Image (tube, rainbow, N blue to C red):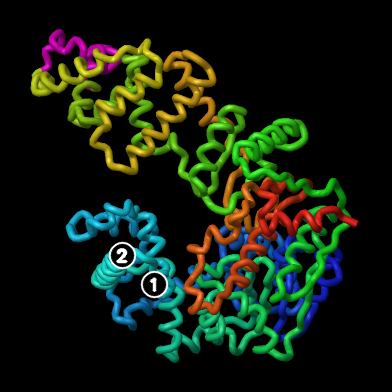
Amino acid sequence: MEQLKRLNNSQRQAVLSNSKEIMLVAGAGTGKTNTIISKIEYLVTKKEVLQSNILAITFTNKAVNEIKERLNISLGSNNVVVNTFHELARTIIYDNDNYKKLGYTNLTIIDDEIKEKTISNMLEITDNFEILNRYGITIKKLMQDFLLIKNNLYIKSKEQDLENQIETLYALYIMYLKNNDLIEIDDLISISVNLLNNDKEILSKYKNRFTHIFIDEYQDINRSQYDLIKLISSKTNILVVGDEDQSIYSWRGSNSKYFKEFQKEYPNCEVIKLEQNYRSTKEILYLAESFIKQNKNRIDKTLITDRTNTIPKILLTNEITKQITYTLTEIQKNKNKYNYNQNVILIRNRNIELITILKIKLVEYNIPYQIIGDYPLYRRKVVKDLISVLRFLENKNNNYHLKRVATNLKFGLGKTFFKILDDIRKNLGIETYFEIIENYNKYHVKKLKRYTNKMEEFINFFDKYNIEKSFDTLIEEIIYDLFYQTKNKDYDYLQEFLKEAREYYKRNGYKTTKEYLDYIQYFKELSTKDKLQIMTMHASKGLEFNNVYILNINSNYPFLYKSNYMKLDKLELSNNNIIEEERRLLYVAMTRAIDNLYIFGDKNSKFIKELNSFNGYT
């Protein structure tokens, strides 16, 4: 097997091992996915294990697709079952309509979009939740609170009335789901566990189906996932892969104890450590390893590499603007060496002030960017409508924008109206809608007569705007005139658009509306393949970038974010446990770096003090 020659000793040991239970302690960047795939290939080609008898479980669809694609190439065909936990649970539930055995008649899984709409509809038809509006509670915030309540992790504060109403609304929401045979995707695993526990036939089928089970990211599993694995793996060979130093999801139910206690559950298991790092430099690893070793409750390992470069830079400033300016200047300076997409800016959470300043500066530096998890402002329907109004005012013969404005806004000129206009254009050889609307009396078409008032209203409405005005003033007038009844969320997007227009005006002086719209179009259409990446530290897990910029490790870090954590008495989390998880999160962020690492923070930050004491590879 040619692949074995390309593995290091520890990887090869894992692949060739005949142990029934294997615990693979795989540090950051040590090639764990490659090891899993090589082990599966070895079992199929050398041990003649049927592909369909092998199950590989991981946490993300991206990881599933990577494993499937590589196995397709190496094995020629791929019948290995590669699933996320949710997909495995869904298969168990829907196989032969198993869900009917739990009393469901037609079970439907809802996603976050449907969940958001469901909650919104409940609020619209229920008039006794006025306190939510008083506190400015958004649907997104309710969804977060519902998740905590579901896991019995909701932390009550002084606002008892507010929190009681949230819990009441959650109870109504659960009742609605149950009455309509709906479940959230996060409920799939617990329902599948319920099925397996209560139906011996289903349990027997899945216990006997697989001879080998692989579980990736085992340090991140929660109780339901653990229960599912225990139920279907009692007769199988099992290999778990994990790194306790990258356990960063306790706030959503994950518990690294299942990984650490694997040896207790399986006393004869073989423990193999992957410590050869294929990503970072010695200098980055030295800082990251020294830092994470301050955690006491961990499995010790030491990552090694032959690559070397300059030591990481720790820059002491708590001013966000200075941090961003330094970062973007550095990225531009190295543009000839690194593409934009080889850089990432990592933040602890989506701080509104930081994101706002960052967006303004990115436009100033003319750097294309992608904020992971952020729906682009210019793709919002309400913003597209506003841009269409501006484009129409700039050129009234633009059929696309006229039709969008007339159809989507308050003018009542819909599909039937434009079907009439299209027939007129075709019969009379007229190019533009506006020519027909402006001169409708010239065309003796009976069907147009009923739209006379609406066409006049449409023309008169837009005649009052002066396209020569500064575009920020023009935008403000249009928002007031056309979007004053817009829902709060959409209105916020319009105000954000106006703010960006004003910032552009300040930097560039008087510019025409056309110039600004052309600028927006240019900025939107910059190559999607070469954009500076911006994301939270959590979102960066499993990724790698040549240059990593970690912003805003301030003196409040980590305690500023206690709300992310569950009730301390439920998890038996002390302040030290929280600090250790936050240290692991920063460690994950640091170990994304291939060549260069930059960390910005306040000199009084606990973590910055620790990092400064270690920085400098020796």
Element type where label 2 sits in the image: helix
Q: Which residues are magenta?
A: 423-445
Kind of residue indicated by mark 1? Lys
The one nearer the camera, 423 or 122, is 122
Q: Where is 313 relative to 235, above or below? A: above
Query: Is label 1 in contact with label 2 (beta carbons under 8 Å)?
Result: no
**Residue in view at x 85 percent, y 53 percent:** 616
Mark 1 crowd level (few <14, some 14–19, many ≥20, 10 Å Cα): some
**Residue in view at x 42 percent, y 37 percent:** 379
Q: Residue furthest front?
A: 604
The one nearer the camera, 99 or 588, is 588
The N terminus, quarter of image: bottom right
The residue singled out by tag 1 in the image is 150
Does residue 444 belong to the magenta stretch? yes
**Residue in view at x 24 percent, y 14 percent:** 464
Kind of residue indicated by mark 2? Ile
Mark 2 crowd level (few <14, some 14–19, many ≥20, 10 Å Cα): many
Element type where label 1 sits in the image: helix
Does residue 100 belong to the magenta stretch? no
Q: Where is 63 relative to 403, above or below? A: below
Question: In the rendering, at what x and y percent does residue 44 appear?
Answer: 71, 74
Asked if residue 177 can be seen in this view, the reply is no
- Which label sits on residue 166? 2
- Closer to the observer: label 1 or label 2? 2
